[in-house]
Image: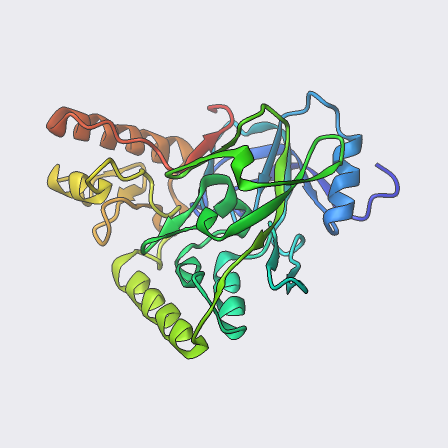
Amino acid sequence: MPDLRGELRENEPMAGHVSWRAGGPVARAYFPADLADLAEFLRRLRPDEPLLAIGLGSNLLVRDGGFDGTVVFTHGVLNVLRQEQDGTIYVEAGVASPKVARFTASLNLVGAEFLAGIPGTFGGALAMNAGCYGGEAWQLVERVLMLNRRGELIERRPEEFVVGYRHVGLRAVTDEIFAAAWLRLATGDAAAARTRIADLLEKRIASQPLDLPNAGSVFRNPPDDHAARLIEAAGLKGMAEGGARVSEKHANFVVNPGGMASAAAIESLIGRIQVEVRHRFGVELVREVRIVGDAA
């Protein structure tokens, strides 16, 4: 594709791009130069080409057979983060969520501290209404900037979306991806915000297996319960398959020590957890992580 400023790779291994450190290749991977370059790339892409946008790959597993389509990478590229004249915070999709927390706190703005506990990019946080410690991404959103397959940028309001627990969808069926958002936060105490961020990070380090490859919480919490409690109550902490293991530190995490497990082993272990919890408690655990591609 002449005149594009980004980099296009073929048969790109995904194990190095997802936090689980497992999975097969993608047929095509595009690393855009910036938002304008990504828009131009999408204008030239076949309309029927399977497309996946990822940031830090912290909530994704690509099956060992790979993904027969195109993946676009946003992290470190769609990285504009600024305060607008109207006081809103403009965040592009590739900005890491913890960076948003620190930036807003430095401006004496409060309400985004919980983002320090979300390991992915803000684009991913928008796509799944990511949250923790009592906060959710869409609580902050005033409007979003979408990018469609024709390379057109479209501003949309929150009321144009169905926003729920770990789920976001446009009310109208479209082919758009999140490019950026404008956030509205309240003015507050910067020192208190920084202290809260530090406390949340300390709590995260103490309670999650951050020293091992993982994809964060594997399952959504059922109504009025916690997936981790159910998994632990079923006696599944430490259960392993093919190098993948249910974390002893946090039962809703599946870890991949040394990156030795295949994507198939991780997916199989996830399925075994669902079967066991369903059998013991009659609860259907719903995956929070996204699994794409073909089996080997």
> Does residue 198 sit above or below 76 in this rendering?
below
> Does residue 258 sit above or below 263 in this rendering?
below
Q: Nearer the viewer, residue 258 or 5?
A: 5
Instruction: For residue 291, say whether it is visible.
Output: yes
Q: Nearer the viewer, residue 295 or 46?
A: 46
Point out the residue furthest to the bottom here.
Answer: 191
Left or right: 39 with respect to 284? Answer: right
Q: Nearer the viewer, residue 222 or 120?
A: 222
Instruction: Tell me the quarter of the picture where residue 95 sits.
Output: bottom right
Q: Residue at x 35, y 54 (%)?
A: 212
Quadrant (top left/top right/bottom left/bottom right) for the N terminus: top right
Q: Position of residue 14 (x, y in %)?
A: 54, 41
Q: Position of residue 241 (x, y in %)?
A: 28, 36
Instruction: Tell me the quarter of the picture where residue 22 sits.
Output: top left
Q: Residue at x 57, y 29 (%)?
A: 67
Instruction: For residue 18, say whether it is visible.
Output: no
Point out the residue furthest to the right here.
Answer: 3
Q: Position of residue 290 (x, y in %)?
A: 44, 34
Q: Residue at x 24, y 27 (%)?
A: 284
Q: Position of residue 127 (x, y in %)?
A: 51, 40
Colour theme: rainbow
> Does residue 212 sit above or below 225 in this rendering?
below
